[in-house]
Image (spheres, grey):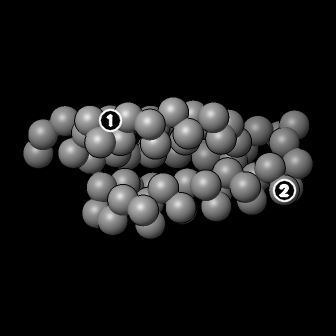
Amino acid sequence: MGKVLAIGDIHTKIWIIEKVAKVINDYDKVIFCGDYADDFSASPQDTLNTWNTLKDLQTKNQGKVEI
């Protein structure tokens, strides 16, 4: 398969997704393993922003990002 980056437990931290976006071209596949938005101190809007940011990354990198 090549180089794979696996990320788990982002807990509504968009900065993690942003860091992945900066290095995504170094990998053949990027897999987000779960616990995307369960930071109970985050607002509903923060949770929605996290999901949207993650989905945007997947859309921009068709076939490379699995969530």
Residue at 55% x, 54% y: name it.
Answer: 54
* In this rendering, position of residue 56 left or right of residue 1: right
Between 60 and 29, the residue placed more toward the observer is: 60
The x, y position of residue 6, in whole percent, is 37, 36
The x, y position of residue 66, in whole percent, is 38, 55
Residue at 30% x, 55% y: name it.
Answer: 64
Residue at 65% x, 41% y: name it.
Answer: 14
Q: State the count of labels.
A: 2
Residue at 51% x, 33% y: name it.
Answer: 19
Q: Is residue 9 visible?
A: no
Secondary structure state at the residue bearing disc 1: strand
Between 56 and 67, the residue placed more toward the observer is: 56
Q: Which residue is mark 1?
A: 5
The x, y position of residue 67, in whole percent, is 45, 55
Secondary structure state at the residue bearing disc 2: helix
Q: Which mark is residue 45?
A: 2
Q: Which mark is residue 59?
A: none
Mark 1 Cα shell of 10 Å, populated few (<14), some (14-19), many (≥20): some
Between 49 and 34, the residue placed more toward the observer is: 49
Query: Is the residue 58 above or below the residue 7 in the image?
Result: below
Quarter-of-image position of residue 40: top right
Specify the amino acid type for callout 1: Leu
